Image (spheres, rainbow, N blue to C red):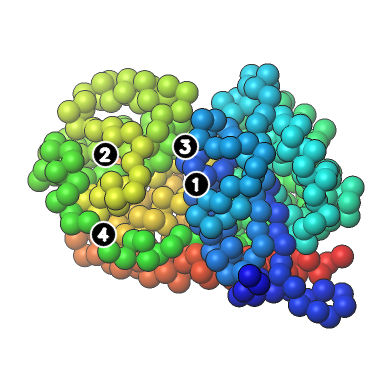
């Protein structure tokens, strides 16, 4: 069977058309959704590219999904060809996912990299992406790097000595040798490219979602059927990983003030715990005297995730550092008015589109943002309408995939 061209066709040097052969190297991949928005956004993109005729293969490790996949063998995941590789766990002292040192992945890269037109490397604090960039340079293969927020000055300041040492030893040359650096927001491009004094080409293409998945939502009352404590309440929704970056400390304090003034409000925290950080959050909740006003659900997926959006009244993400904000885009697609910090990558687009309220990362600012919406039904409606429009116009996965395909084609022609 001959694969369809779709927008996956490219012209070779001899003028003949062929199918784009794209390799994506990413340290962790679907269904390891506990590692956040990068997993969702990468898989969303790859599904569309594969469907449209791109000969796409993902190389990744089995971190977070050890018992669910076959190693070093091609697996089809939602139409996407994926090869999962095992890794040596000796380096887990580096962090929760370790360095993901994988000789099988390295050997496969060395053997097969010449079979691809372009390599897309996603994230960089790990062995798979570092060795992929090395072999791309060695084999004169064009490659694109997507840092996914790891080079924000605020983020680099955390454990700075370790990060700068690793950056100078391994990453700097790989980054500067890339055909393009791909950022997902204007904010990330502006802050990171100049911060690292990079001179190579860079481009901004956002992450995307399938807006059709959010077009028909469960009835609003179904969330209260899952969590009866939410009945007849105005629900403030936080949806994301429970870790230090998300600003939950200031959210809890801001919500405590909100709940004293609005007795019918309730905070719903949806997401998986990272490093027992939830214990700290629960401590702040007790200190503020609002344990009966906050509900943790753990991670929700599928229709239950949609119920969380459709059954809530306001979405809040006051992150200290967030290179994009997939849940922000999902909330907008669901018609939720949003309150986000100016450290969330998409804040400029949200502000320009009048799709929500952008606040500072302090308790008083977050409180005022939530209170402003709660007290103004007209503003909530306007934000909701503008958010749905923005999600469809800017973040629809079909448009994002088309833009990424243009980037891949341009990169393939660069050598």
User: Which quarter of the figure is the N terminus placed in?
Assistant: bottom right
Question: Residue 158: where, in percent of width, then height?
Answer: 61, 30
Q: What kind of element bears circle 2?
A: strand
| Residue holding disc 2 | 268
Determine the image quadrant of residue 97. top right
Task: Report the residue at 41% width, 29% height from top.
Answer: 273
Q: Residue furthest left?
A: 232
Mark 3 sits on what residue?
Answer: 34
Q: Residue at x 29, y 50 (%)?
A: 303
Question: Which secondary structure, mark 1?
Answer: helix
Please state the horizontal and vertical placement of residue 283, each as a whole percent of the image. 32, 20
Q: Relative to the observer, which residue lies in front, 319 or 363?
A: 319
Between circles 2 and 3, the one closer to the viewer is 3
How busy is the neighbourhood of tag 3: few (under 14 within 10 Å), some, or many (20 plus)? some
Pointer 2 with pointer 3, Cβ within 8 A: no
Q: Which residue is mark 4?
A: 217
Between disc 2 and disc 1, the foreground one is 1
Q: Is there a contact, CB below 8 Å, between mark 3 and mark 4? A: no
* In this view, 351 is above or below 343: below
Which callout, 2 or 3, points at the residue further toward the start of the chain? 3
What residue sits 55% from the left and 37% below the top?
69
């Amino acid at each position: 069977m001959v694969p369809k061209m779709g927008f996956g066709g490219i012209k070779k040097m001899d003028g003949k058309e062929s199918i784009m052969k794209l390799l994506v190297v990413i340290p962790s991949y679907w269904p390891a959704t506990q590692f956040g928005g990068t997993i969702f956004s990468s898989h969303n993109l790859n599904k569309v590219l594969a469907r449209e005729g791109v000969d796409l293969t993902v190389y990744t490790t089995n971190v977070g999904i050890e018992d669910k996949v076959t190693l070093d063998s091609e697996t089809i995941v939602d139409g996407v060809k994926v090869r999962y590789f095992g890794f040596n766990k000796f380096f887990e002292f580096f962090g929760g996912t370790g360095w993901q040192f994988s000789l099988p992945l390295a050997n496969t890269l060395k053997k097969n990299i010449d079979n691809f037109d372009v390599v897309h490397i996603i994230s960089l604090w790990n062995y798979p992406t570092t060795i992929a960039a090395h072999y791309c340079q060695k084999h004169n293969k064009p490659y694109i790097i997507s840092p996914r927020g790891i080079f924000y000055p605020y983020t680099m300041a955390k454990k700075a000595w370790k990060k700068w040492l690793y950056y100078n030893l391994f990453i700097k040359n790989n980054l500067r040798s890339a055909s393009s650096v791909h950022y997902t927001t204007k904010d990330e491009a502006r802050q990171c490219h100049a911060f690292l004094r990079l001179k190579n080409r860079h481009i901004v293409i956002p992450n995307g979602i399938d807006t059709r998945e959010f077009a028909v939502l469960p009835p609003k009352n179904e969330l209260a059927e899952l969590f009866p404590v939410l009945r007849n309440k105005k629900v403030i929704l936080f949806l994301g990983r429970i870790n230090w970056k998300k600003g939950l400390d200031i959210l809890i304090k801001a919500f405590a003030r909100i709940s004293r003034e609005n007795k019918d409000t309730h905070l719903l925290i949806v997401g998986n715990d990272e490093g027992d950080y939830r214990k700290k959050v629960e401590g702040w909740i007790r200190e503020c005297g609002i344990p009966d006003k906050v509900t943790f659900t753990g991670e929700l997926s599928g229709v239950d995730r949609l119920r969380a959006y459709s059954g809530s009244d306001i979405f809040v993400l006051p992150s200290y550092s967030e290179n994009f904000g997939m849940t922000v885009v999902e909330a907008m697609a669901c018609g939720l008015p949003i309150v986000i910090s100016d450290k969330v990558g998409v804040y400029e687009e949200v502000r320009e589109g009048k799709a929500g309220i952008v606040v500072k990362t302090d308790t008083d600012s977050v409180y005022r943002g939530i209170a402003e919406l709660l007290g103004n039904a007209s503003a909530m409606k306007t934000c909701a309408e503008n958010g749905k429009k923005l999600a469809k116009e800017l973040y629809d996965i079909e448009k994002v995939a088309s833009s990424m395909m243009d980037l891949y084609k341009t990169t393939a022609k660069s050598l």
